[in-house]
Image: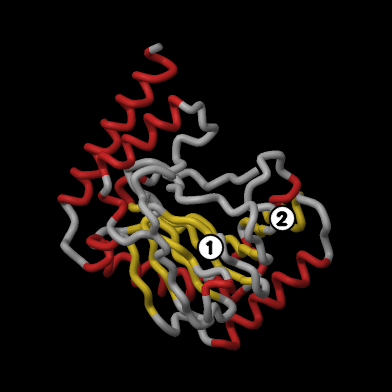
């Protein structure tokens, strides 16, 4: 009983308390208040187009998940057995394929993030994510992990002008929804959900989404309740996703996805 239910609930409560302590020590910026911040024109249209073409060429050359270059991995989600996000393809460590994602990009991104978070950050890696239209297998509201937080920086590489084109969806301020997150963990344990980070309850009929032109940067706290748009029925969306840790919680190890 303790290992299967009480232990995870106690761990969730402890992590939420740590999350509260962490944010209480940060400046009261708009990003820390909302857990999300949108910055226009972070990359130029030409830079976005070049990264899209690079990604297309690598995916066209490979039709199965696996290494496609030294320490660069193509993940085709349809190859997985969980039936979620089956129209998604990801190139992990995409930054190793393009000079456009070298030190200039990383330094600019670090500075932008640190100015809005109020703490030094560690950039881990970049992923190119390609979402084909999908209205059936998108994962619903969830967090990437339970607190303490980690972060992502999303750069739209293609225009997303309506909800049918797959905008990023996230609920501002939900990174501070302490008791709702604990409640969802408890429900997930009771229902034996395979993912404790599913956040399907106490959300309401929310439809928060963010349209943007290519080149737009979205700074995001990944303890926000977020999802891919379940209404994505038009055209393929390309997104550059950079994984970021605060210096406080970085373990100094590279991220591994395979």
Instruction: Tell me if mark 2 has few (under 14), some (14-19) or many (20+) residues whose alpha carbon lies within 10 angstroms of its own.
Output: many
Q: Residue furthest top?
A: 1
Which quarter of the image is occupied by the N terminus? top left
Front residue (pair 206, 73):
206
Instruction: Tell me if mark 1 has few (under 14), some (14-19) or many (20+) residues whose alpha carbon lies within 10 angstroms of its own.
Output: many
Front residue (pair 146, 70):
146
Q: Position of residue 208 (x, y in %)?
A: 40, 65
Residue 229 bears which disc, if any?
Answer: 1
Chosen colour scheme: secondary structure
Of callouts 1 and 2, the N-terminal one: 2
Kindly identify the residue that appears in the image at 63 percent across and 60 percent down.
135
Q: Position of residue 11 (x, y in %)?
A: 33, 28
* Tag 1–tag 2 contact (CB < 8 Å): no
Is residue 51 placed above or below 231 in the rendered structure?
below
Kindly identify the residue that appears in the image at 59 percent across and 78 percent down.
158
What kind of element bears circle 1? loop
Which quarter of the image is occupied by the C terminus? top right
- Label 2: which residue? 74
Q: Is residue 127 left or right of residue 177?
A: right
Is residue 130 placed above or below 137 in the rendered structure?
below
């Amino acid at each position: 009983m303790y290992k299967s239910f009480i232990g995870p609930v106690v761990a969730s409560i402890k992590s939420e308390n740590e999350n509260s302590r962490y944010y209480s020590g940060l400046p009261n910026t708009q990003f820390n208040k909302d857990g999300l911040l949108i910055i226009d024109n972070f990359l130029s249209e030409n830079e976005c187009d070049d990264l899209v073409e690079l990604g297309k060429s690598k995916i066209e050359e490979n039709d199965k998940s696996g290494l496609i270059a030294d320490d660069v991995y193509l993940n085709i989600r349809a190859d997985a057995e969980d039936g979620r996000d089956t129209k998604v393809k990801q190139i992990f460590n995409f930054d190793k394929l393009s000079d456009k994602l070298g030190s200039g990009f990383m330094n600019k991104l670090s500075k932008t993030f640190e100015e809005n978070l109020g703490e030094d950050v560690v950039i881990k890696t970049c992923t190119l994510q390609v979402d084909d239209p999908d209205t059936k297998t998108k994962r619903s509201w969830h967090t990437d992990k339970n607190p303490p937080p980690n972060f992502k920086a999303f750069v739209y590489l293609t225009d997303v002008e309506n909800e049918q084109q797959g905008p990023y969806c996230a609920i501002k301020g939900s990174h501070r929804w302490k008791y709702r997150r604990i409640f969802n963990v408890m429900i997930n344990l009771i229902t034996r959900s395979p993912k404790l980070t599913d956040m399907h309850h106490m959300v309401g009929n929310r439809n928060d989404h963010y349209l943007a032109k290519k080149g737009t940067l979205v700074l995001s706290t990944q303890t926000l309740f977020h999802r891919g748009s379940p209404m994505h029925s038009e055209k393929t969306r390309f997104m550059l996703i950079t994984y970021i840790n605060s210096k406080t919680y970085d373990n100094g190890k590279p991220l591994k996805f395979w």
